[in-house]
C-alpha cells in the first residue's frame, strides 16, 4: 500500500448520529465522526483505562471488551483495548485501528447500538466526562520537538540574528531537538515556573533565579504507531502508516534561560521543565476529511531532497487544523472575565509535513517506538494574530499585549492559565475538535541555595 493515509469512509458520514445526545450538538469537539482515544480513571475504576471521547462522555473500551461488545476483533486488539495505556494499540497495524474505529462507531450510533437496549451494559460502558480524570494517553518513551513553521523560524530568527533570520539549512533539514519525555504532563497539571541561569545584555555575569520570560508554544503532537528497527529508516511513502494520531502540545519555554544556553547545542533546561499535552489523541483516520496539499513552496525555494519528497505527501500531506491560544489571568478569573484569544493559526501552513518529520527522524537509522511523541514546533502563520507564542506576539516583550482586564503581558505571570484549542471543519463534513490543552503557571519554588 503506497498511498498516504486513510480514506474517507462511512465513519465520517455527516448523517451519523449518536445515542449520546451531547455528541450531536453543533460545535462539540467529539461528535461520532471523531472518536479520539485516551486514558482515564474514574471513581468506579481507579485503574487507568482506555476510553473513546463521545460528546461530554467517555466510552470505556475495557468494559466494552468485557461485555462482549467488541467480540470478533483479533485477540491482540482485545488485549490492547484492556491495557492501561494506548501503547499496545498504537503498536498494531493501521488496518486494525481502522477496524476498531468502525466497531466503536457502530456501538455509538443511535440506530444500531446494542448498548441502548440494555441499561446494565449502558451503566458499565458509559462514563460522564466530568467523572473521568484524563491522564497521559501513552507511556511516552521519547519526545522530539521540531521547528516546522517557517513563519515562526523566520520571526524568531530575526530577533536573534536580524541580518540572518533563516539559517541556510532550514529549507533542507526539518530542524529538531531531543526533548524530555519525563516532564510531559497531562492537560490541567499546574506548571511551576522554572529557575535557571540567565544573562541580560546589560549584565556582565549570569545569575541564577526564577525565569522572568516564561512563554508558551502552540504546537501539535504526533504520536508514533508501529516503530521501525534500528538501522531501518521509514521511507516517506510509508510514514503515515506509522502515525497513530495527533494531540495539542504546549512546549513551555523560558526565553531568558534559552537565550543564554541555546548555543552551541540547542535548547536544554529552558524547555525540559514541563511540556503539556491534551488528553485525547485524534486519529489520522478521523482527520482524513481534512487532509490538504502540503504547503506549496514559494518559487525559488529548493525542492525537498528525494528521501523527503513524495507525490502523495505533496498532494495530501497537510492537515487543515485551526489552532488557538487562549489566556486567563488570575485577576481575570477573580473578576469573572472569560479567557481571551491571543492567536489563531493553522497546521496546514507548516513548511514540513508530519510524514517528512517522521521520515527525517528515522533517516539516520534512529528507531522510533509506539507512543513516541514528535511535536511540530510552534505553529505560526504569516499574520500578526497567528503568532503561536508570546516571544513573537510581543516582539520579545517590547510590544506588550493589553488584556480585557487592563493588565499587560510581555511574558507569562504566575496564575496565568494558557488554554490551547484545535479543530477541523470543512464543507460536507462534521466539525471535529482536538479538545483542550490547559496549564496554569505556579510561582517558582523557593531556591534552596
Ligand atoms: Mn517548541
Image: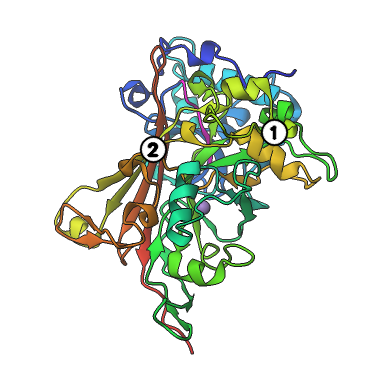
Name the foreground residue: 400 vs 343.
Answer: 400
* Residue segment shown in magenta: 33-38
**In the image: residue 92, left or right of residue 26:** right
* Residue 344 percent coordinates (x, y): 34, 39
Q: Is residue 119 visible?
A: yes
Mark 2 or 1, which is nearer the eye?
A: 1
Q: Residue at x 40, y 11 (%)?
A: 428
* Residue 66 percent coordinates (x, y): 62, 31
Q: Tell me if the residue at label 2 has its CB under 8 Å from ligand 1.
A: no
Q: Is residue 4 visible?
A: no
Name the foreground residue: 178 vs 95.
Answer: 178
Q: Which residue is mark 1?
A: 308
Q: Which residue is mark 2?
A: 345
Give the alpha-carbon distance from disc 2 to disc 1, as whole Å: 25 Å
Seen in the picture, residue 314 relative to 113 is either above or below; the reply is below
Name the foreground residue: 419 vs 67.
Answer: 419
* Residue 235 percent coordinates (x, y): 76, 31
Amino acid at each position: 500500500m503506497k498511498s498516504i493515509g486513510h480514506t474517507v469512509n462511512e465513519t465520517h458520514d455527516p448523517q451519523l448520529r449518536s445515542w449520546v445526545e451531547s455528541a450531536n450538538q453543533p460545535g462539540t469537539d467529539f461528535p461520532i465522526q471523531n472518536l479520539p482515544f485516551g486514558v482515564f480513571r474514574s471513581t468506579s475504576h481507579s485503574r487507568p483505562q482506555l476510553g473513546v471521547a463521545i460528546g461530554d462522555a467517555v466510552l470505556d473500551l475495557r468494559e466494552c471488551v468485557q461485555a462482549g461488545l467488541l467480540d470478533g476483533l483479533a485477540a491482540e486488539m482485545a488485549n490492547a483495548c484492556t491495557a492501561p495505556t494506548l501503547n499496545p494499540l498504537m503498536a498494531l497495524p493501521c488496518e486494525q485501528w481502522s477496524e476498531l474505529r468502525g466497531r466503536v462507531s457502530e456501538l455509538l450510533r443511535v440506530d444500531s447500538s446494542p448498548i441502548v437496549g440494555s441499561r446494565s451494559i449502558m451503566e458499565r460502558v458509559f462514563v460522564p466526562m466530568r467523572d473521568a480524570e484524563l491522564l497521559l494517553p501513552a507511556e511516552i518513551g521519547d519526545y522530539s520537538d521540531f521547528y516546522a513553521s517557517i513563519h515562526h523560524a523566520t520571526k524568531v530568527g530575526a530577533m536573534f540574528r536580524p541580518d540572518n533570520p533563516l539559517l541556510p539549512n532550514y529549507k533542507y533539514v526539518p530542524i529538531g531537538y531531543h526533548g524530555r519525555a519525563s516532564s510531559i504532563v497531562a492537560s490541567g497539571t499546574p506548571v511551576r515556573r522554572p529557575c535557571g541561569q540567565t544573562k541580560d545584555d546589560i549584565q556582565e555575569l549570569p545569575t541564577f533565579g526564577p525565569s522572568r520570560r516564561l512563554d508558551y508554544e502552540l504546537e501539535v503532537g504526533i504520536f508514533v504507531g508501529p516503530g521501525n528497527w534500528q538501522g531501518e529508516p521509514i521511507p516517506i511513502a510509508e510514514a503515515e502508516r506509522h502515525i497513530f494520531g495527533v494531540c495539542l502540545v504546549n512546549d513551555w519555554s523560558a526565553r531568558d534561560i534559552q537565550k543564554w544556553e541555546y548555543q552551541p547545542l540547542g535548547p536544554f533546561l529552558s524547555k525540559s521543565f514541563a511540556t503539556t499535552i491534551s488528553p485525547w489523541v485524534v486519529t489520522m483516520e478521523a482527520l482524513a476529511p481534512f487532509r490538504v496539499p502540503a504547503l506549496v513552496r514559494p518559487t525559488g525555494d529548493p525542492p525537498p531532497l528525494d528521501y523527503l519528497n513524495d507525490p502523495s505527501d505533496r498532494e495530501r500531506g497537510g492537515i487543515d487544523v485551526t489552532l488557538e491560544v487562549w489566556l486567563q489571568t488570575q485577576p481575570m478569573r477573580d473578576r469573572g472575565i472569560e479567557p481571551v484569544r491571543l492567536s489563531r493559526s493553522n497546521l496546514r501552513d507548516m513548511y514540513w509535513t508530519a510524514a517528512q518529520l517522521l521520515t527525517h527522524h528515522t533517516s539516520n537509522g534512529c528507531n522510533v517506538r509506539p507512543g513516541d511523541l514528535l511535536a511540530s514546533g510552534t505553529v505560526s502563520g504569516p499574520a500578526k494574530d497567528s503568532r503561536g507564542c508570546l516571544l513573537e506576539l510581543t516582539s520579545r516583550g517590547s510590544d506588550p499585549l493589553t488584556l480585557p482586564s487592563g493588565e499587560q503581558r510581555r511574558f507569562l505571570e504566575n496564575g496565568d492559565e494558557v488554554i490551547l484549542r484545535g479543530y477541523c471543519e470543512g464543507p460536507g463534513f462534521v466539525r471535529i475538535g482536538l479538545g483542550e490543552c490547559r496549564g496554569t503557571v505556579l510561582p517558582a519554588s523557593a531556591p534552596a541555595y
